[in-house]
Image (cartoon, rainbow, N blue to C red):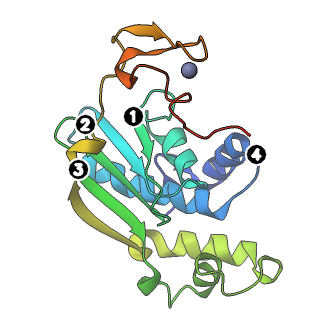
Amino acid sequence: MNSVCGYSIAEYIQKLTDFHGNFAPGLFIGGYMVDIAKRHVCQYEIFDAICESPACLPDAIQMLTPCTIGNGWLKIVDTGRFAIALYEKTGGHGVRISLDAAKLDAYPEIKNWFLRLTAKSEQNRDDLIRQIIDAGDDIYSVREVTVSPGLLRKHKHGGRIALCVSCGEAYPEEDGTVCLACQGMDIYR
Ligand SMILES: [Zn+2]
């Protein structure tokens, strides 16, 4: 495949490098995954996204769709699997795309990278890029999904704000009598 979401391969590589800070194979592959997903959800006017990996993949969604962490349309649900889903935002019906290890035998560089079979220093980046381009849609699994209701977008904004009696900072009142940090959420040492 010679384009990713309307960008030429060279344009996409430049774009992802600028956005991400360096070239990441996972982000390159992520572009293909978003491209496939968008072809399936084009009938939805507004869609949300789930990313099952916190590394690289979220940036592909943020670059190539309107869904970002900041606007709340992209959620990271860390299952550790290399997969994304785009889905219609109210009903949760959509499509899940994953990189499929069972489909990589014809693409040894991708297999080596994905399953970490060889050290990074022994991987050939040009071959890897070439194989990802050559593979096109062939190395991904696509399935229809319906996202669990608990993960569908909730409208948190608009609720009342309280001042936490423990730390003094403002927080959404619906979170409880003190803020989530003072309820024990462990962020800083
Ligand atoms: Zn507090």
Mark 1: secondary structure: loop
Q: Residue at x 44, y 39 (%)?
A: 65
Mark 2–mark 4 Cα distance, whole angstroms, equals: 30 Å
**Where residue 148 is drawn, which disc sits there?**
3
Classify 63 as above or below 12: above
The amino acid type found where label 4 is placed reads: Gly
Whether residue 1 is visible: yes
- Mark count: 4
**Where residue 21 is drawn, which disc sits there?**
4
Crowding at label 1, few (<14), some or many (≥20) Cα neighbours within 10 Å?
many
Which is nearer the eye, 159 or 173? 173
Q: Residue at x 72, y 86 (%)?
A: 118
Crowding at label 3, few (<14), some or many (≥20) Cα neighbours within 10 Å?
few
The amino acid type found where label 3 is placed reads: Ser
* Residue, far bottom: 105
Mark 1–mark 2 Cα distance, whole angstroms, equals: 8 Å
Q: Earlier in the sequence, mark 1 or mark 4?
A: 4
Q: Earlier in the sequence, mark 1 or mark 3?
A: 1
Mark 1–mark 3 Cα distance, whole angstroms, equals: 15 Å
Of badges 2 and 4, the one in the foreground is 2
Crowding at label 4, few (<14), some or many (≥20) Cα neighbours within 10 Å?
few
The residue indicated by pointer 2 is 89
The amino acid type found where label 1 is placed reads: Trp
Of badges 1 and 4, the one in the foreground is 1
Q: Are marks 1 and 2 in contact (CB under 8 Å)?
A: yes
